[in-house]
């Protein structure tokens, strides 16, 4: 099944999820060729839900013993999208079977692929998955602004009006949508096996980053020692990875990621509730009703909806 999507390209439905046509081949290659190691860390998310932040945090936590001081952290000179590459939108985008030998352990990759379509080795190995989700209304606005900012659109087709793209959003037609099925896929595994999946919410990270830094470290089997806490390691990492800090680093202000996305476009506003500046209460209500009917009661715990 194919549908036009608002940048003039095509979405295809694969395994029950909508993906841009050009991501189908890289998704299939990832499924076929990516072999997870037990020590791998996979950062999974619905696009525009805080992946970049999670990349910076996880990389800094997992590699903190490699750098004698925080000044040596590669994030100071490398964009988080490069430090932790995405499987299907980056590594497998132009290569069917890229060589991943040069990644040192623990390897950290991101993906937007729904849980059920992940390569078998990710689901069956001991590797860890961290999933981040976000209020879908904020996610929708973030994605729309991202596409407008990057002009990811066919020159001959004007971007859809807000109302039209919102209508598609309500039908679940988005990159790796529907969002309810994407989130439920990871949520259900987290409920059954919290050692395999850590389920995070963008809003919670905004509320108490120190708590979640520790939680991520524990989940990865490298908890912060008392000595580290006394030395202020958690504060250093949360500060380095903060929106204001990352946004203002030279490396994140200029240049492009995979040729089409501005490095700066991954750092827009970084706030909770920006949807209220774009969507009417009636639109929000419409979406919430859909979400509630699709999530079978799980939405109250799984998805921030306010
Ligand atoms: P906004 O567009 O609402 O500002 P992703 O990384 O999954 O593409 O998500 C991008 C969203 O996360 C954008 O949201 C971006 O500004 C926000 N973001 C990026 N880095 C962040 C950080 N360090 N802290 C908080 N939010 C961040």
Image (cartoon, grey):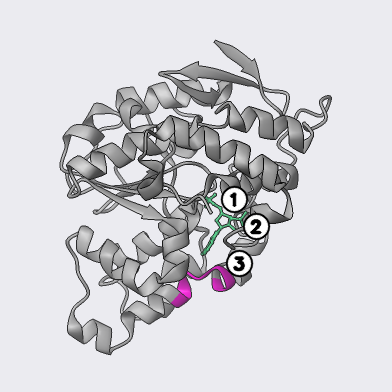
Q: Report x, y in % for residue 266.
A: 60, 54
Q: Quadrant of residue 111?
A: top left
Q: Alpha carbon of mark 2 to alpha carbon of mark 1: how far?
A: 6 Å
Where 146 falls versus 203 (above or below)?
above
Q: Earlier in the sequence, mark 2 or mark 1?
A: 1
Residue with the mark numbered 1: 138
Query: Please, what is the dominant secondary structure of the magenta stretch?
Result: helix
Q: Closer to the camera, 210 or 164?
A: 164
| Label 2 lies in ligand 1 vicinity (Cβ under 8 Å) | yes
Q: Alpha carbon of mark 3 to alpha carbon of mark 1: how far?
A: 19 Å
Q: Report x, y in % for residue 221.
A: 17, 61
On screen, residue 145 versus residue 231, left or right, reads right
Q: Quadrant of the N terminus?
A: top right
Cβ atoms at labels 2 and 1 below 8 Å apart? yes
Residue with the mark numbered 2: 274
Residue drawn at (72%, 47%), measured in percent from left and top? 280
Instruction: Report ligand 1 position as a quadrant.
Output: bottom right
| Label 3 lies in ligand 1 vicinity (Cβ under 8 Å) | yes
The boundaries of the magenta stretch are 239-245
Q: Earlier in the sequence, mark 3 or mark 2?
A: 3
Q: Report x, y in % for residue 194.
A: 20, 48
Residue with the mark numbered 3: 247
Q: Nearer the viewer, mark 3 or mark 2?
A: 2
Few, some or many residues within 10 Å of mark 3 (<14, 14–19, 20+): many
* Residue 173 in view, yes or no: yes
The answer to whether residue 152 is magenta is no
Q: Alpha carbon of mark 3 to alpha carbon of mark 2: how far?
A: 18 Å
**Figure label count:** 3
Residue drawn at (77%, 31%), measured in percent from left and top? 160
Residue drawn at (19%, 66%), measured in percent from left and top? 222
Q: Report x, y in % for residue 187.
A: 31, 41
Q: Closer to the camera, 40 or 232?
A: 232
């Amino acid at each position: 099944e194919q549908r036009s999507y608002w940048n003039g390209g095509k979405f295809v439905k694969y395994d029950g999820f909508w993906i841009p046509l050009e991501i189908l081949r890289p998704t299939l290659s990832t499924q076929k060729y990516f072999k997870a190691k037990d020590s791998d860390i996979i950062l999974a998310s619905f696009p525009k839900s805080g992946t970049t932040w999670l990349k910076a945090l996880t990389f800094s936590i997992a590699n903190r013993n490699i750098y004698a001081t925080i000044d040596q952290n590669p994030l100071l000179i490398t964009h988080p999208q490069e430090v932790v590459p995405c499987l299907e939108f980056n590594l497998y985008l132009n290569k069917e079977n890229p060589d991943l030998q040069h990644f040192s352990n623990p390897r950290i990759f991101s993906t937007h692929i729904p849980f059920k379509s992940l390569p078998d080795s990710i689901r069956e190995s001991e590797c860890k998955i961290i999933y981040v989700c976000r209020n879908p209304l904020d996610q929708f606005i973030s994605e729309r602004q991202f596409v407008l900012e990057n002009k990811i659109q066919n020159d001959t087709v004007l971007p859809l009006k807000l109302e039209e793209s919102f209508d598609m959003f309500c039908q679940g037609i988005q990159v790796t949508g529907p969002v309810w099925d994407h989130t439920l896929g990871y949520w259900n595994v987290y409920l059954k096996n919290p050692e395999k999946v850590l389920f995070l919410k963008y809003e919670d990270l905004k509320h108490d980053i120190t708590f979640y830094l520790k939680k991520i470290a524990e989940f990865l089997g490298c908890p912060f020692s008392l000595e580290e806490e006394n030395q202020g390691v958690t504060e250093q990492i949360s500060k380095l990875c903060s929106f204001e800090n990352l946004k203002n680093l030279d490396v994140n202000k200029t240049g492009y990621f995979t040729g089409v996305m501005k490095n700066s476009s991954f750092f827009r506003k970084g706030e909770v509730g920006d949807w209220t500046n774009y969507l009417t209460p009636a639109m929000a209500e419409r979406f919430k009703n859909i979400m509630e009917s699709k999530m079978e009661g799980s939405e109250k715990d799984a998805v921030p909806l306010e």
